Amino acid sequence: MKRQSLAQSSILIIALIALHRQGLGQTSLGTSSLGGTVSDSSGLAVVGANVELTDVTRGLHRTAVTNDSGNYVISGLSTGQYSLKVAKDGFTTYTYNEFSIEVNQRATIDVRLSVGDLKQIVKKKFNV
């Protein structure tokens, strides 16, 4: 009796492991990525820009910060519709709405930021 119960338990555990490996327990991370370079109007790299990617269908947000070369990469993306926002103090915010990411895609969106309005810069700097 105990042997039969132990055998049934073992089979159940093996079946659960097999189902998990087939995707039952997969996370929402995908195989695609988005990257690019953020530069200013003269083509110089914008270091430290905040990049926010939103999966508009699921409402999930992913973020990155540009490196010393102005580059960013956000990986592990699932197929879907996305929007992109790039912001940096002293520059106008860049927004790109509703674009698709496909399976195994390595998408590239390069962003060129314009210098912000002087009034905006002063307000942000001094909290006016």
Image: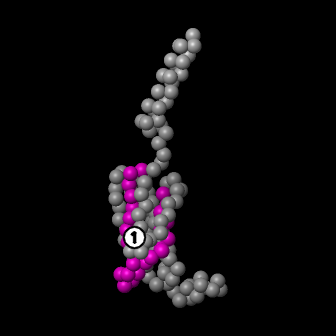
Residue at the spot 50% in from the left edge and 22% down from the top edge: 10
Residue at the spot 51% in from the left edge and 53% down from the top edge: 58
Q: Amino acid at mark 1?
A: Asn
Q: Position of residue 34 (x, y in %)?
A: 39, 61
User: Does residue 42 show up magenta in the picture?
Assistant: yes
Does residue 90 show up? Answer: yes
Magenta-drawn segment: 30-55
Image quarter where the C terminus lies is bottom right
Q: Position of residue 98 (x, y in %)?
A: 44, 62
User: Does residue 40 show up magenta in the picture?
Assistant: yes
Q: Could you classify mark 1 by the number of other residues whose Cα lies within 10 Å: few (under 14), some (14-19), or many (20 or more)?
A: many
Q: Nearer the viewer, residue 116 or 48?
A: 48
Residue 29 sits above or below residue 97 on the image: above
Q: Quarter of the image holding residue 19?
A: top left
Q: Quarter of the image holding residue 113?
A: bottom left
Residue that label 1 marks: 71
Looking at the image, residue 101 sits to the left or right of residue 9; the answer is left
Q: Nearer the viewer, residue 91 or 64?
A: 64
